[in-house]
Image: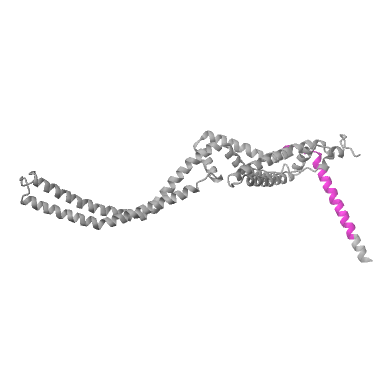
Amino acid sequence: MQENASGHSMEQIQRSSKFNQFLWWLSTAEKELLENAVVDRNRYAITGFTVMGTWLFATLAWTYFFSTVVDSILAAILLGIFMGGIILGIDRALIKGINRSNKLKLIPISFRVLLAMTIGLFMAQPALLYLFNKEIHVQISLDNEQRKRNKLQSQDSVYQSIKAPIVEQRNRLQQQLIEKDKEVSAARLSFIAETDGTGGSKKIGLKDIAQAKQQAYLRLQADYTLLESGLRPKLNEADSSLKQIDAAILKEQAAFETLLNDGFITRIEALNNLIDKNRSVAFRYYLLVAILMLIELMPVIAKTLLPSGTYDEHAKLQEAFEISELQKKYHQLTEKKETDLTN
């Protein structure tokens, strides 16, 4: 049985716990190459643990995100698992590309960190929405009320060009009736004053002057009645038009209110408004963003900071050996073909 310097054999590797083997797989380590890399087994288990944490966090974050945009909890869970798997694949690809030769090179590491930060920043949003859920729903209520007011103001401005001439015509017609009514009232008061002796002639009773004022009052009253009968249909038509416009505004407002929701974008806007208005919330927001982004960065950080052991050398030699064997097989196949052609 083949043994390494520490007395550990491949059989012992096979007997390693399934969980450790799973962690090695997460960290993209080849189980067979760990046969002679005893120290690296723990290192890759640590890296795998960080990958698992990021994977679980991504799955939960995406599940919560999809729960805000779909009605089915089962669909949200399945989509969350799917997106978590994609994040897992990206993380494994990121750490697989980090090895002894390039872990200290600025450009590849910067690219990996930038990609991890981008993913982490987006995944932090659903987590923050969950943590600030109660405060966000209060802010959503305030924001929706402001949206209703803004919508009503915009509707008023849109319909203003239609309502303005109708209101102007209605006011003009009403002003005519008011002025005519003032004339009738003045004539009536003048006639009454003439009959009770308080008028110009100082004679009580229906005398000549009083009769003349009575006739003038009756003519004005008839004119007012005639004017009102002519203007009333126009006033009613104007009132009806204004009521129709108001009904249309209310209908559009009601339709708009049915569109108000607490979806993902609405919650993000509420969170931003909450941050702008509350400095204590803003401080904790940015602190949580940093912590949550660190979760996504941990696999890359762990793979970069952990020292390189014998595993990388084994991987390099194994790859060189496989290339050498492949070249030998290719040369043998080429020689065989040339021999067959010669014969």
Query: Image quadrant of residue 228?
Result: bottom left
106 vs 225, left or right, is right
Q: Is residue 307 visible?
A: no
Name the residue: 8% across, 52% down.
211
Q: Is residue 63 magenta?
A: no
Q: Nearer the viewer, residue 67 or 312?
A: 67
Q: x, y (%) of residue 299? A: 70, 40
Q: Is residue 309 magenta?
A: yes
Name the residue: 21% across, 57% down.
226
**Principal SS element in the magenta part?**
helix
Q: Quadrant of the N terminus?
A: top right
Q: Nearer the viewer, residue 138 or 252?
A: 252
Q: Is residue 163 above or below residue 138?
A: below
Q: x, y (%) of residue 338? A: 90, 63
20 vs 143, left or right, is right
What residue span does the magenta drawing correspond to?
305-334
Q: Residue furthest top?
A: 280
